[in-house]
Image (tube, grey):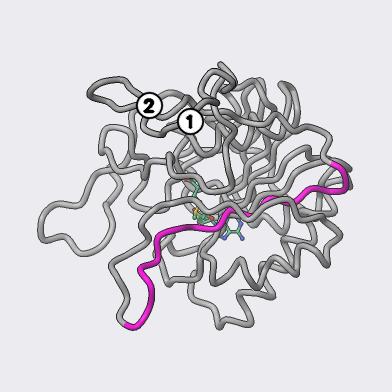
Amino acid sequence: MHPPILTTDLGRLHRGDCLDLLAATADGAFDLVFADPPFNLGKDYGKDVGDARAEAEYVAWCGRWIDECARALRPGGAFFLFNLPKWNVVLAPRILAAGLEFRHWIAVDLKLSLPIRGRLYPSHYSLLYFTKGKPRVFHGPRVPVPACRHCGGDLKDYGGHRGKLNPAGLNVSDVWTDIPPVRHRATKRRGANELSEKLLRRVVEMTTDPGDLVFDPFGGSGTTYAVCEQLGRRWVGCELGDCAPIVARLRGEASLFVPPQRGDAGRGARRK
Ligand SMILES: C[S@@+](CC[C@H](N)C(=O)[O-])C[C@H]1O[C@@H](n2cnc3c(N)ncnc32)[C@H](O)[C@@H]1O
C-alpha cells in the first residue's frame, strides 16, 4: 500500500484499493468499520473505479472486503454496511459467515428514486449493524421527544406515561426517519452518494469511545473521516478515485463541487 496522501493528528488517508490496504492491516486493528460501497448501479466514480459488475461478481467482490474487514475488527468491535436492501439481503449471510454477529437491520428512510412500475416505492436504505462477539461499546442514542413546530406541544399522546419519559429523550429505534439527504449546494462535497454527517455521528457515537480507531474503506467525500475529526476518534481512510474532495474537506477548504447547470447531463463537474 502506498504511504498516506494526507495525515492529521487523528487519521491518515490512503489513495488506492481498500483490499490492498486491508491486506497490510493487522488482525483486530479497528474498533469500528463503516462501509458505504458503490451500489453497482453503473455510477461514474471516475476512470479508476468500476461500478457495473455482473451481480455474482459484485457479491464476490463485497465478500472479499467483508472477510478482510471482519478479520481486521477488534473483538467487540462494530461493523456497519450501508447499501440497497437488494444487496444487503445477500450480503448479510456473508457477514455472518465471516464470523460477525447480527445486531440490527436499520432502515434509513430516504427516498431512493422515482417510483418503479410494478413495485412498492423504494423508500429506505439498509444499514446493517454487526459486532465481533459481544459489543465492547454501545451508547444507546436518544432523540428529543417529537414536538409540533408551531405550538411546541407533543406530536404523540403518551397518556399517563408522559412524566415517565427519560428527560434525555426517546430511545432511537431501528427505523431512522431523521437523516436528511445531502442536497444543499453550500454543504455538498460531491455530486452524489454523500452521506449525512448526522448518520455517521450517530454510528460513531453509538459504537465507539474517544480515541478508538475507525476505518471506512470507501472514502467518497470523506464524511466518516470529517465526523471522526469532530468527535476525537482516530481514523484510517481509503479512496480509489479522486481524493481531492476529501483532502479539501479535512483541510477546511471550500467544497470543490460545482452543481450541474441546467442542460448538463448527469452529475456535477469539479472545479479545477
Ligand atoms: C458510495 S461512495 C462513498 C460515499 C461516502 N460514504 C461519503 O459520504 O462521501 C463509494 C466510494 O468508494 C470508492 N471505491 C470504489 N471501489 C473502491 C475500492 N476498491 N477501494 C477504495 N475505494 C473504492 C468510490 O470511488 C466511491 O468514492
214 versus 80 height, above or below: above
202 versus 166 height, above or below: below
Decide which of 97, 176 is in the foreground and name it.
176
- Circle 1: residue type: Tyr
Q: In the rendered image, which residue does mark 1 sit on?
A: 158
Q: Residue 152: x, y in percent?
A: 31, 20
Q: Are marks 2 and 1 in contact (CB under 8 Å)?
A: yes
Label 1 secondary element: loop
Identity of the residue furthest to the front in this view: 160
Left or right, 234 with respect to 47, comes to right
The residue range painted magenta reads 118-134
Q: In the rendered image, which residue does mark 2 sit on?
A: 154
Left or right, 250 with respect to 238, comes to left
182 versus 204 height, above or below: below
Quadrant placement of the C terminus: top left
Q: Using the rendered view, name the quadrant where residue 230 is placed.
A: top right
Image depth: mark 2 or mark 1 in front: 1
- At label 1, counting other C-alpha atoms closer than 10 Å, the crowd grade (few under 14, some 14-19, many 20 or more) is few
Q: Residue 6: x, y in percent?
A: 59, 33
